[in-house]
Image (tube, rainbow, N blue to C red):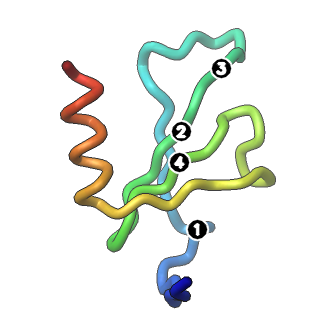
Amino acid sequence: MSVEQVTESVDELHWFKSSYSGSGGGDCVEVAAGPGAVHVRDSKAAGGGPELRVGRGEWAAFVTLARG
């Protein structure tokens, strides 16, 4: 197991929700691009729930596969 130091403040990230998300809530995620990683969270738990931190290269690979 490895431990890495997180140097970016999650409080300073600018979060974006998909334009496909409706205004009525539901199952939505938000993403924020930081200098070293992309952060993903549940929009219903914004600011208080868990977040997934993914490397930029891994995020780019995920988006490429998701586009099909």
Task: Please name the amino acid that badge 3 sits on.
Answer: Asp
- Label 3 Cα neighbours within 10 Å, binned few <14 / some 14-19 / many ≥20: few
- Vertically, is 64 above or below 66? below
CA neighbours of label 1 inside 10 A, class few (<14), some (14 to 19), many (20+):
some
Would you name the residue on which mark 3 appears? 27
Percent x, y for residue 68? 19, 19
- The residue beneath circle 4 is 40
Q: Where is residue 38 drawn, in percent x and y?
A: 40, 57
User: In the image, what residue occupies the spot 33% across and 71% down?
Assistant: 35
31 or 58: nearer the eye?
Answer: 58
Q: What element carries label 4?
A: strand
Disc 4 to disc 1, C-alpha distance: 11 Å
Q: Residue at x 28, y 60 (%)?
A: 56
Tell me if 23 is positioned left or right of 57 in this view. right
Left or right of residue 44: residue 7:
left
* Mark found first going from the N terminus, 4 or 2: 2
Q: How far apart are marks 4 and 2 (CA)?
A: 6 Å
Q: Which SS class for mark 2?
A: strand
Identify residue for label 2.
30
Q: Which percent across, then down, holds residue 11?
A: 62, 67
Q: Who is closer to the viewer here, 55 or 49? A: 55
> Which label is found at residue 10?
1
- Residue 64 figure quarter: top left
Q: In the rendered structure, which amino acid carries the disc numbered 4?
A: Val
Measure the alpha-carbon separation of dots 1 and 2: 13 Å
Q: What element carries label 3?
A: loop
Gap in Å between the C-alphas at discs 1 and 3?
A: 22 Å
Q: Residues within 10 Å of mark 4 (few under 14, many from 20)?
A: some
How far apart marks 2 and 3 lie (CA) works out to 10 Å
